[in-house]
Image: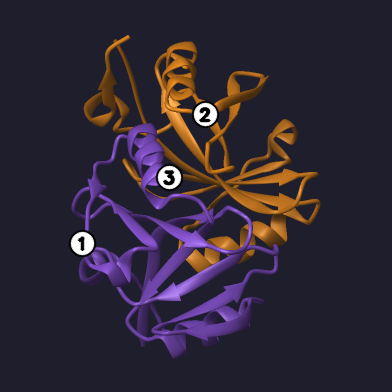
Chain colours: A purple, B orange
Amino acid sequence: MHRSQLAGFIIDCQRGSMHEAADFWSQALGFPRQHTKDPSEANYELLQTGPNNLHVELQNVDHESRVHIDIETDDIDAEVDRLEKLGAKRIEAIKGWVVMQAPTGHRFCVVRPQRANFEDEANQWPD
Amino acid sequence: MHRSQLAGFIIDCQRGSMHEAADFWSQALGFPRQHTKDPSEANYELLQTGPNNLHVELQNVDHESRVHIDIETDDIDAEVDRLEKLGAKRIEAIKGWVVMQAPTGHRFCVVRPQRANFEDEANQWPD
């Protein structure tokens, strides 16, 4: 048995200023920016959505701007298997997560647990 | 003063079967489908995310598949004005909502309140 749930979504921003992008989306959605001084995180900006809420993050990317969904899980291999059986394709593994493509053409990622409510609320799936 | 918050996101699916698309995303995210027999709603499939959670819906579209963000508000004109001042552009009004484009290039929509927690939790903005 493993578990998964919707983690949230990532606002992929093509080669722009992460600060300007985060300023806009922070004010548009009313979520404060969570500033980080870690230079290895310069391509990411997390928004503060509150405990138990969805994970909403901006990412600097080379491809066109888009929004992608993240699914969080306590067992990435088992979750990728489950999603492949539903018709998704595995595209590539990057660091600790896996990029997949839905039958509807949308790219999405399978990631480790991000949300505080994962233990209490994630779906359980038989393996 | 008016109010707004993140309503949720719409999974825009290019000219495919809405039933197959909803089957995949319902099982992938673990949200039951909310079936409707209203033929005017044949291009939409709402997923049941639970009370107070984000609104997650599939939509049949002619453009390429993508995910777009919805912002819900009790005053669409005032919210569009606020977002224009932040740098977004108004693209078009469709039925009861307005399509906008963020400075980051993402299309998003300004819609009427969708979530049960709107009254209690939406952000307040001075006009």
- Percent across and percent down for residue A86 are 62, 76
* Closest to the observer, B62 or B78: B78
Quarter containing the N terminus of chain B: top left
In the picture, the disc for residue B88 is 2
Can you identify the residue that label 1 sits on? Answer: A37
Residue A86 shown left or right of residue A80 in the figure: right
Secondary structure under badge 2?
A: loop
For marks 1 and 3, the one nearer the N-term is 3
Up/down of B127 relative to A126, above or below: above
Residue B62 shown left or right of residue A76 in the figure: right
Give the residue type at disc 3: Ala
Give the residue type at disc 1: Lys
Same subunit, tags 1 and 2: no
In the picture, the disc for residue A21 is 3
Secondary structure under badge 1?
A: loop
- Percent across and percent down for residue A52 are 22, 55
* Mark 1 crowd level (few <14, some 14–19, many ≥20, 10 Å Cα): few
Nearer to us of marks 1 and 2 is 1
Up/down of A46 relative to B118, above or below: below
Nearer to us of marks 1 and 3 is 1
